[in-house]
Amino acid sequence: VQLVESGGGLVQAGDSLRLSCAASGSTFSINAMGWYRQPPGKQRGLVAHIMSGDGSTNYADSVKGRFTISRDNAKNTMYLQMNSLKSEDTAVYYCNALTRAWGVMYTYWGQGTQVTVSS
């Protein structure tokens, strides 16, 4: 599975931004996809994830009510709509996919896209 993020950039606090993650390869094997972020000098952490089967979602408390994760299965693309951005949302955002083959879970990462929110 290959993942390519796009949509990052420099915005002002209160603005919106939409990230995209295009998946290719063995996309039929993806069980779940998610967005992670790594702020400067901090560890990478989960932002949101979405299950392939029922489309259920989960969000980090810090983004609930502001961010929305979605997936277009026909396009093999996942999105992260980010509204009411804050300076603390500044980070490199990574796309993640989990697959299962022969009872073994595999994880895949995109290259990351920078989101910078100026206050």
Image (tube, grey):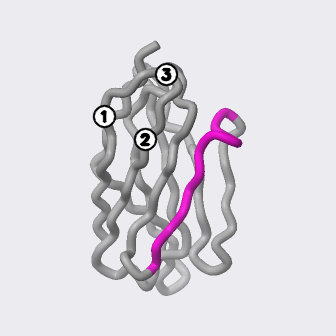
The residue that mark 1 highlights is: 9
Q: Which disc number belongs to residue 13?
A: 3
In contact (CB < 8 Å): disc 1 and disc 2 = yes
Q: Nearer the viewer, residue 76 or 45?
A: 76
Label 1 secondary element:
strand
Q: Is residue 103 left or right of residue 4?
A: right
The residues tagged by marks 3 and 1 sit, at their Cα atoms, a distance apart of 13 Å
- The residue shown at (50%, 78%) is 100
Q: Nearer the viewer, residue 107 or 68?
A: 68
Tell me which segment is drawn in magenta.
Answer: 62-73
Quarter of image, res 64:
top right
Residue 105 point in image, percent of width and height: 51, 71
Label 3 secondary element:
loop
**What type is the residue that disc 1 sits on?**
Gly
On whether residue 96 falls in the magenta region, the answer is no
- The residue shown at (32%, 27%) is 10
The residue that mark 2 highlights is: 17
Outermost residue toward the front in this view:
15
The residues tagged by marks 1 and 2 sit, at their Cα atoms, a distance apart of 8 Å
Label 2 secondary element:
strand
**What type is the residue that disc 2 sits on?**
Leu
Q: Is residue 52 left or right of residue 109?
A: right
Residue 53 point in image, percent of width and height: 62, 80
